[in-house]
Image (tube, grey):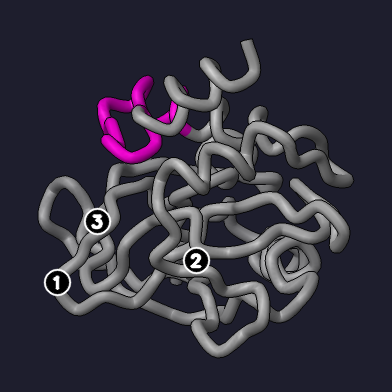
Amino acid sequence: MTMWVFGYGSLLWNPGFPVAETRKATLHGYGRSFCMWSIHHRGTEENPGLVLALDEIESAHCTGLAFAVEARHEAATLQALRERELISSAYVERELDVELECGERVRTVTYVVDPEHVQYCGGMALETQAQVIARAIGGRGPNTEYLYNTAEHLSEIGLEDTDLTWLTARVRELTA
């Protein structure tokens, strides 16, 4: 059976595992937003950044990519994803169904935010998000790089996210 992983943020441009197939996919019941403080990868505890997460919202949906993991790489992929995504337990690993562009449904390993976790910051105004992203830097680099790469890759695959487009323009203004 094929192992699928749903990507909606940095996995879009940096999956970090061997991919056999990539398909556009939609996850219903969750929205992509900068609703998680980043104190490791894109910020620090003293100067946190923001990263994207999937926030459970009944009427929402998120379109991203479903990655089929190359055969015989499933265990190593799951281990690498857990080391990357579960660094602070703000993300929760779930097996959720997504709908592929063709209408087929597949079960995916998906990382969603824990709304009870201290790093959760859902509902933050876009302007506040822009101010945070413009200044934060973490172990994997500037928060701006994370935003720009994600927005650019969404656009490249024809999945523009209006909030990320606005944030990109605003953060560019703030850092000019």
Dot placed on the residue nearer the N-terminal end, 1 or 3: 3
Describe the element under mark 1 as helix, strand or loop. strand
The local crowd at label 1, few if under 14, some if 14 to 19, many if 20 or more residues have their Cα within 10 Å, is few
Disc 2 marks which residue?
Answer: 3
What amino acid is labelled 2 in the image? Met
At a point 33% along the width and 26% down the height, the residue shown is 157
Dot placed on the residue nearer the N-terminal end, 3 or 2: 2
Quadrant of the rendered image containing residue 13 = top right
* Residue 42 point in image, percent of width and height: 75, 46
Residue 26's disc is 3
Describe the element under mark 3 as helix, strand or loop. strand
Range drawn in magenta: 151-165
Residue 169 placement, left or right of 145: left
Report how far apart the C-alphas of labels 1 and 2 lie in the structure: 27 Å
What amino acid is labelled 3 in the image? Thr
Quadrant holding the N terminus: bottom left
Viewer-side residue, 15 vs 18 = 15
- Mark 1 and 2 residues: CB-CB less than 8 Å, in contact? no
Residue 59's disc is 1
* Residue 166 point in image, percent of width and height: 35, 30
At a point 57% along the width and 81% down the height, the residue shown is 92
Let me know if residue 60 is in the magenta part.
no
Disc number lying in front (1 or 2): 1
Q: Residue furthest top?
A: 176
Placement of 115 over or under 43, stated as above or below: below
Quadrant of the rendered image containing residue 134 = top right
Residue 83 placement, left or right of 67: right
Let me know if residue 157 is in the magenta part.
yes
